[in-house]
Amino acid sequence: MYIFLLAASPVMPTGFNPYLTAIAVLIGLVFGLVVARFMVRNRLDTANAKVERLQSEAKADAEVVRRTAEVEAKEEFLKGQEQLRTEAGEMRSEFKDVEKRLAKREDNLEAKLDTLETKERNLEKEREKLSTRLDRLTEQEQEAESLLVARRDDLLKVSRLSIDDARAAVFDELKIELEHESAELIEASVATAKDEAIARSREITLTAIQRYATEHTCDSTVSTVDIPSDDMKGRVIGREGRNIRAFERATGVDVIVDDTPGVVVVSAFDPIRRETARRALERLVQDGRIHPGRIEELVISVRKELDEELLETGKKAAVEANLGGLHRKELDLLGRLKYRTSYGQNVLQHSLEVAFLCQAIADELGLDGRLGRRCGLLHDIGKAIDHDVEGGHPKIGADFCKRFNERPEVLNAIAGHHGDIPSTSPYTPIVMAADAISASRPGGRRESLERYVQRLQQLEEIAKAPAGVKEAYAIQAGREIRVIVDAKRVDDAVAAKISRDVAKEVEENMTYPGEIRVTVLREVRAVAHAR
């Protein structure tokens, strides 16, 4: 290799012989070829040896894997055979058990069939007996009918009455007897109920009233705003009335500006709108800047402040009633009840009073006082939105509170405290009683004179309707109706029935707070003159 490289070198020494050089080059090439061929053959031998070694190792590994797979396959096959034998044995035992049960059930069915056949034979015998008895009874009935016909003909001949006259006489007599019997039963039942309940109910009612009573405030449908001068009245009206029209449009109220000095009247049926308008007008008068833009801005500000105040009022009412877990919207409606009145009675104060009355009554009866207080506080919540939602306030309030997952007892008390739906819990009649106590106590509510007179007239008309009534008078502001009956036509038992009938008629046809007492007077007077 070295000679070959030397021959290929471009540097030629001095005295160079070209023939020798060519020979040397050939020798080098031959030698290099021989060496390269030797190296290639050596590498091929090495590779062949390696391939043979790898093939032998692969065959050995494949043989090991094959033997291992055969062993594992044999083991799995043996295990499968054993498992099949076990399952087959279990199935054989189960089949034997099933066969035993079926055999036993078959025996039972055969026994029941025998019993049924025996019963059928007995029933057939009983049917034959009943058929014979029915035929006998039919014959006896026909004989009885013939005897009755003969007896009726004899009676008609003796009494000289027709069948219709005799029937009418019997019915009249039965009616009088039944009327007396029903009156006696009613009187006995009422007396028993009074003996058992009047003492306890009076104690519970008086205890509840003594434990909680508040003063009530009265609001009307108008509010007045003091005006310092007539010039300010003119500014409130504005040029060609633009200010007052903008104010009424923004607040939804009627503003009455008349000749009364120093006063402007704000009129609206919705108490929240009326209060918003009153506050906004007072601030406009104090500010002095009265124009449509300022009016709209101030009304929005006052409405926002009033909403926050209503929410705070609802929270205070909940704290006063010691109730938690009320939703924000429920608290907002409670606050709105502050500006709502019913028969002159503030509804929020009335709800608080009813809440504590319900707690007192529930505690006396051994019920949950806290739940009773919750029912009482929320019973009139529908009155806060009955101007905006169609329907009565019990249904409106129940539907509203249902959205906030109130308990079924609370929902039934709200919806049923006026008897619109049946009571499903003891708290509903408790709320009804507390509502009546709060409404009927002296000073609790006030009515207009016209409505008051109409109610008294209706009471007297209902009381005069029954037969045998001579006079009827409503006394104690309509809390009691006294009925005077004819002593010759009405006895004591019928008098008790008349009092019950009048009370029931009043309950069905009249709306009133509290309760109305019906007193029937039957008086016998014997008059003689000494001369």
Image (cartoon, grey):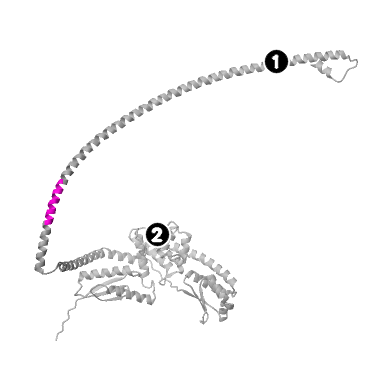
Q: Which dot, 2 or 1, sits closer to the camera?
A: 1
Quadrant in the picture for the C terminus: bottom left
Q: Does 132 sit left or right of 228 as displayed?
A: left
Camera-side residue: 172 or 414? 172
Q: Say whether residue 409 is visible.
A: yes
Q: Say whether residue 371 is visible.
A: no
* Residue 184 picture quarter: bottom left
Q: Does 268 sit left or right of 432 as displayed?
A: right
For the stretch drawn in magenta, what is the main secondary structure? helix
Q: Residue furthest right?
A: 15
Give the residue at mark 1. 41
Question: N-terminal of the two: label 2 or label 1?
Answer: 1
Query: In the rendered picture of this protein, how many numbered marks are placed on residues?
Result: 2
Q: Position of residue 113 (x, y in %)?
A: 22, 38
Any magenta on residue 24?
A: no
Give the residue at mark 2. 411
Q: Position of residue 43 (x, y in %)?
A: 69, 17
- Badge 1, how many Cα within 10 Å: few under 14, some, many 20+? few
Residue ID at (12%, 59%): 145
Q: For the residue marked with disc 1, what is the amino acid?
A: Arg
Quadrant in the picture for the N terminus: top right
Placement of 94 over or under 514, stated as above or below: above
Magenta region, residue range: 128-142
